[in-house]
Image (cartoon, rainbow, N blue to C red):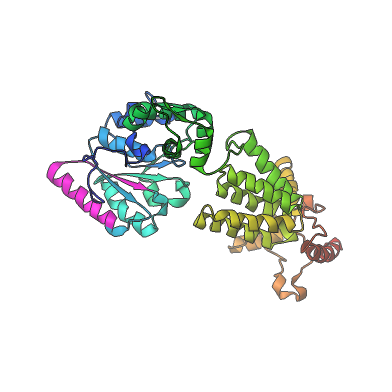
Amino acid sequence: MDLFESSRIHRAPDESTPLAERVRPRSLGEFVGQEHLLGEGKPLRVLIERGQVPSLVLWGPPGTGKTTLARLIASVTNADFYQLNAVSSGVKDVRDVIERATRRRAEHAAATLLFIDEIHRFNKAQQDALLHSVEDGVLTLIGATTENPSFEVISPLLSRCRVYVLQPLSDVHLQRILGRALEADPHLAALAVNVQDADHLFFLSGGDARTMLNGLETAVRLAAPTAGAPLLVGRKEIEEAFQRKAVRYDREGEEHFNLISAYIKSIRGSDPDGAVYWLARMMEGGEDPKFIARRLIVLASEDIGNADPYAITLATSVFTAVDYVGMPEARIILAQATTYLASCPKSNASYAAISAALDDVRSLPDAPVPLHLRNAPTELMKDLGYGKEYRYVHDVPGAFVEAQYLPEELADRIYYRPTTQGAELKLRDRLNVWWKRRQR
């Protein structure tokens, strides 16, 4: 089977085929999860059953059924199915599929469905190559992504697709998938596999059905068979299969918020050791490294600010680096940022400044912009005094003008009060001089 061969041709799975593929659902009735999209009467199910599926993007975590759903849509709608992986495919591959789809449409009035896994990794040129065929209906595109398509898919292509969000699978979903695998897979059924600690298996899987099934298959191979008895798979085999011990962490529950809170407060409190420990707990628990990196960007501005202006640059660079590198190396990048930010001088003066200004904006009437600060693009505006007496600071020695930039009603307000921490001390000294001159 080559890269573009239709999925209508199936090779009967054998024991060498991964378990996740052997028990992949072959009908909508076997599909587990995503009830908000595929439950009776739900939008995507209705479109599938009517054979009127538009081009769409499936956005969700790994192992939630994106590939399976694309294959089921092709099967139910009787479309030829082609799959590309954005990591290994280029513009030529896309054009080859479009050419085949165009020919099939003209010769046999046959529908074509192109599934692109990890579409967020396609560059602009690759995505541009899809636009015309998607718009003309030559093929139906289904893109799968774990990243926000608003940022990763070009606007012209995104506007031609519907976006459906897939949710992580719950333990109830994983239990159903596990039960079906134990019953439907001939190899597991022949061994009479008995999973003794399914909750632990679900926990280590993190809502990812593929991870669970792959881990289960490895655990089955590690378990010691007993003649004439069911094959027992316990916690020991499960942990050996996943190669990590249990970590108490729920990415959507209380522990998730407790650990990220402890982490941020440790950095804010200038304790790099505590911060690194909580970082390790989150990493070992399977937290999304980009979630942590985003929080560091906020912290760098909220809690460090101008005490070390480099902090925000570092934090932003860290997010980019984590996105490029991924796990497990991302842990090193996060550790560097964590220890630096925890060791920085701290100031929340900028955060306090915008909070105080917002309070005034929300509680007081809108004050008019002083005339000397107004834009004056026309002669009438100039005649009305717009921009009059405005002085360009770069024409003045020291680049400072003794002028009032706040509305008259707020002339006494001081929103930004620099601390004496780090680089902010120099800003404080400079502003003190300017404040005194303005008061005159």
Residue 212, relative to residue 316: is it above or below?
above
Residue 97: x %, y % from top left = 24, 51
> What is the number of callouts on the image?
0
Residue occupying the point 60% across, 39% down: 247
Residue occupying the point 45% across, 42% down: 62
Asked whether 426 or 201 is in front, the reply is: 201
Q: Is residue 420 magenta?
A: no
Residue 306: x %, y % from top left = 73, 60
Q: Is residue 257 left or right of residue 128?
A: right
Asked whether 384 or 166 is in front, the reply is: 166
Residue 14, relative to residue 355: is it above or below?
above
SS majority, magenta? helix
Inspect this view and state whether residue 49 appears. yes
Give the residues drawn in magenta, as a range.
93-117
Q: Quadrant of the C terminus?
A: bottom right
Q: Which quadrant of the structure image shows residue 21?
A: top left
Inspect this view and state whether residue 368 appears. no
Q: Is residue 108 magenta?
A: yes
Q: Is residue 359 left or right of residue 239?
A: right
